[in-house]
Amino acid sequence: FMLILVTADNFVQMFVGWEGVGLCSYLLINFWFTRIQANKAAIKAMVVNRIGDFGLALGIFGIFICFGSVDYATVFAFAPQLSSCTLSFLNIEFKAFNLIGVLLFVGAVGKSAQLGLHTWLPDAMEGPTPVSALIHAATMVTAGVFLLARCSPFLEYCPGALIIISLVGGMTAFFAATTALVQNDLKRVIAYSTCSQLGYMIFACGLSNYSVAIYHLPNHAFFKAL
């Protein structure tokens, strides 16, 4: 599923991989299904991720309404011409690109455990330790950062969305790092640390420094998994 997500050339295929890794995460957190805490953690991860996925799905619908296509190549090619496009909802005109950018970011917030939808990641440590190391520290949680970096040619035309992205990323980096200081369980400390580092990556994306974010992503994945 991770390969489907990364190798996709359109938003729909990417969404299939996105949902797939969410499902695998749910099943792996619930590995010890006799433990009530593991059951609760798995359900929490599933529900919180559904909020993010709903935002991402709305963003993809918005892209289809504006561009008539969900192919990355088409969307990125026509982004400069359609940047003044508006969407009306309840008689209010929205700048379509900013709205779509924020909706895509809501998807990234859910998957990358940013402030507001971060609560599932520390609880996800109820799963086996190899799962925590590989899925919830290195691979799945970085999908949100990957999404923002993949949509970078589009996000450059959403200045409002970029401001929100950098604010949320910066706040998460600070909040999660300070929360980690008062945790008693080592795996929860590592979970909050992951959350904080993802905040730095999102912050870099919000400042349009996608190369820095993608450099930090594998860097963090290696040292955190080890």
Image (cartoon, rainbow, N blue to C red):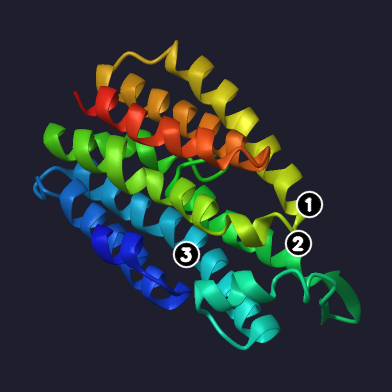
Expressed as whole percent of the image width and height from the top left, the position of residue 220 reads 35, 28
For this rendering, which residue is in front, 207 or 119? 207
Q: Helix, strand, or loop for circle 1? A: helix
User: Is residue 142 depicted above or below 50 in this figure?
Assistant: above
Kindly identify which residue carries mark 1.
159
Q: Which mark is residue 26?
A: none
| Residue 53, numbered label | 3
Q: Is residue 146 left or right of residue 152?
A: left
Check whether the beta carbons of the residues at disc 1 and disc 3 lie within 8 A of each other.
no
**Residue 138, image x and y in percent?**
29, 37
Mark closer to the observer (1, 2) = 1
Check disc 2: other Cα within 10 Å, few if <14, some if 14-19, many if 20+. many
Split into 4 quadrants, where in the image is the C terminus?
top left
Question: Mark 2 — residue?
Answer: 98
Residue beneath the point at 70% across and 82% down: 66
Point out the tag, 3 or 2, that comes first from the N-terminus.
3
* Viewer can see residue 218: yes
Sequence-wise first label, 1 or 2? 2
Quarter of the image that includes the N terminus? bottom left
As measured in the structure, the alpha-carbon distance from the residue carrying label 1 to the one carrying label 2 is: 7 Å
Mark 3 → mark 2, Cα distance in angstroms:
18 Å
Is residue 115 visible in the rendered image? The answer is no
Q: Give the mark nearest the N terminus, 1 or 3.
A: 3
> 17 and 22: which one is in front?
17
Which amino acid does the dot numbered 3 rest on? Answer: Asp
Please state which amino acid type lies under the numbered disc 1.
Answer: Pro
Asked if residue 169 is positioned above or below residue 52 in the image, the reply reads above
